[in-house]
Image (cartoon, rainbow, N blue to C red):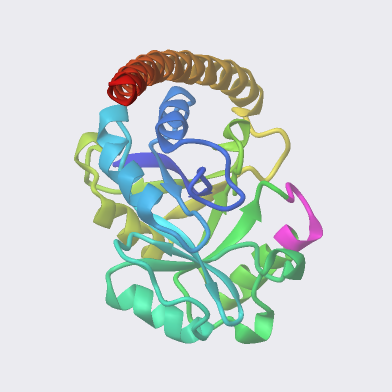
Amino acid sequence: MSTLQLDFHVHSEGSYDGHEPVDLILEHAADIGLDGVVITDHDVIYESKRAAELAADYGLIGIPGVEISTAHGHLLAIGIDEMPPRRAPYDETVTWIRDRGGVAIVPHPFQRTRHGVRKRNIPDVDAIETFNAWLFTGYKNQRARRYAEAYGYPTVAASDAHTLPYVGRAYTEITIPEIDREAVAREDVLTAIRNGSTAVQGRRAPVPMAAKHYAIGAARKSGYYAKVGTLQTASYARFGTLKSGSLLKTGVEKGLAGMEKLVAALR
């Protein structure tokens, strides 16, 4: 039996409100002991697909996804490889996701300021996000949990991270019987969600990893951007040298051309 820890709701720099590159998110997730993260950028999937392809390099399970804007609020599409239609009715989007082998998870329900779906618009879905780390132990998290319990929906927890230190602040434990961790694939995780083999972590603050997250996240982010800055500086320096050489060559050529015109005029 395998018990895995996954964060199903993380935003990268591919999202209009995200900040972090996916390789940094993956490296951080591995360091803090997660078994996988799903990049769920708003209405774009290209960075999520790239992250899923790179995940194995970090010892993580690769699962693509997206946070899609429907006509009735946001919806997480987990385990799909293409973009769902935007602004379609909620129930039609759920069907679209399922038809392509994915699972449909309601993120931060009832939170209208964050485009959460209203209760009356929730159709038959695969799971409810009953703990969103951005609210911690807020009333809407509690309401989501009560709703999921009342209607028998599987529950998940996620960080909804937009910056690195929040990755994994809340996560879902997935239990997969009779499969070793090394053999677990995307479909095994999706099946476990559908079957309700999930446990919410992050109900109390701080979650066990929180302090470690902040320390590692701050240090890793500083190191990453220092490296990027060095590479960019070297690139700019090289570009400047090439440009200076080009300008010098152009200046010499123009000078010679001017001299030739002057000599011709004096003749």
> What residue do we see at 41% from left, 15% from top?
244
Q: In this view, does 263 lie to the left or right of 150?
A: left
> Splitting the image into 4 quarters, where does residue 181 fall?
top left
| Quadrant of the rendering where the N terminus is positioned | top left
User: Residue 52 in the image: x percent, y percent?
Assistant: 31, 45
Magenta span contains residue 138: yes
**Does 68 appear above or below 235?**
below
Percent position of residue 243, x then y: 39, 20
Residue 143 location, quadrant: bottom right
Judge by depth and name the residue closer to the eye, 58 or 195: 58
Residue 57 in the image: above or below residue 144: above
Q: Residue furthest left?
A: 183
Give coordinates of residue 250: x percent, y percent. 34, 22
- Where residue 163 appears, as percent x and y from the top left, is 61, 37
Quarter of the image with the C terminus in it: top left
Identify the magenta region. Answer: 135-141
Question: How many marks are shown on the rendered structure?
Answer: 0
Residue at screen point 36% across, 22% down: 258
Query: Taking 246 as reference, is 156 above or below it?
Result: below
Q: In this view, does 9 lie to the left or right of 35?
A: right
At 57% from the left edge and 39% from the top edge, which residue is drawn? Answer: 19
On whether residue 191 falls in the magenta region, the answer is no
Farthest residue toward the front?
Answer: 267
Residue at horizontal 32%, vertical 35%? 60
